[in-house]
Amino acid sequence: MSNEPDDSLIVQVRTMQIIVFAMATGCVMFAIIALVIVDPQPPNGPPMISWIAAAMGLVGLIAGTIVPRLLAVSQPATGAGYQTLLIVGLALYEGAAFFNLVAFLVEGQMFSLAVAVVLIAAIVMALPTVGRVQDWIDARQRRAEEAEAFSRR
């Protein structure tokens, strides 16, 4: 466990930041296009696509938080391991955001747009920093050392 991150970790974190930025930007650009294109019409029936998309948004938000934690046990305590988990979580958020944006395009329901904005915010909030990644690596290494010490008993 080191206090100073090495240069390769700094480069990996910069790559992760670019990935987060690209995923968030893609969603934001699609949201802007959807806002320009959508022609709000009174619904002909219940907005089923929008309700399904909102439910999937909730599932995506929960899964994007839980699935990376479940997968963490199989990942090495490295920047690459963190990056893998980050991308998995972000992909779940992004997919649900795009589904809600498509629902907004199809049915014009503002709550679909709101759900997409929440999911985009979750993507942005996952922006990694060198300190956050280093803390994750250090905690994983500590747990591995504790597990090894416990198994020796």
Image (cartoon, helix red, strand yellow):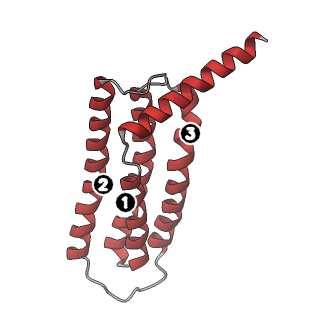
Q: Give left or right: position of 137 versus 151.
A: left
At 34% from the left and 65% from the top, the residue drawn is 102
Circle 3: residue type = Arg
Name the residue carrying label 2.
24
At 50% from the left and 56% from the top, the residue drawn is 61
List x then y, in percent, for residue 149: 70, 15
Q: Nearer the viewer, residue 87 or 153?
A: 153
- Disc on res. 69: 3
Do callouts 3 and 1 mark residues in contact (Cβ within 8 Å)? no
Dividing the picture into quarters, in which one does residue 12 lie?
A: top left
Q: Nearer the viewer, residue 58 or 52?
A: 58
Q: Give left or right: position of 72 versus 89.
A: right
Binning the other alpha carbons within 10 Å of mark 3 as few (below 14), some (14 to 19) or many (20 upward) gives: some
Which quadrant holds the C terminus? top right
Do callouts 2 and 3 mark residues in contact (Cβ within 8 Å)? no
Dividing the picture into quarters, in which one does residue 31 lie?
A: bottom left
List x then y, in percent, for residue 124: 36, 54
Disc 3 element: helix
Name the residue carrying label 1.
120
Binning the other alpha carbons within 10 Å of mark 1 as few (below 14), some (14 to 19) or many (20 upward) gives: many
Dividing the picture into quarters, in which one does residue 25 lie?
A: bottom left
Circle 1: residue type = Ile
- Residue reaching furthest to the bottom: 42
Q: CA distance from mark 1 to mark 2?
A: 6 Å
Do callouts 1 and 2 mark residues in contact (Cβ within 8 Å)? yes
Q: CA distance from mark 3 to mark 1?
A: 20 Å
At 55% from the left and 31% from the top, the residue drawn is 139
List x then y, in percent, for residue 5: 36, 27
Disc 1 element: helix
Circle 2: residue type = Ala
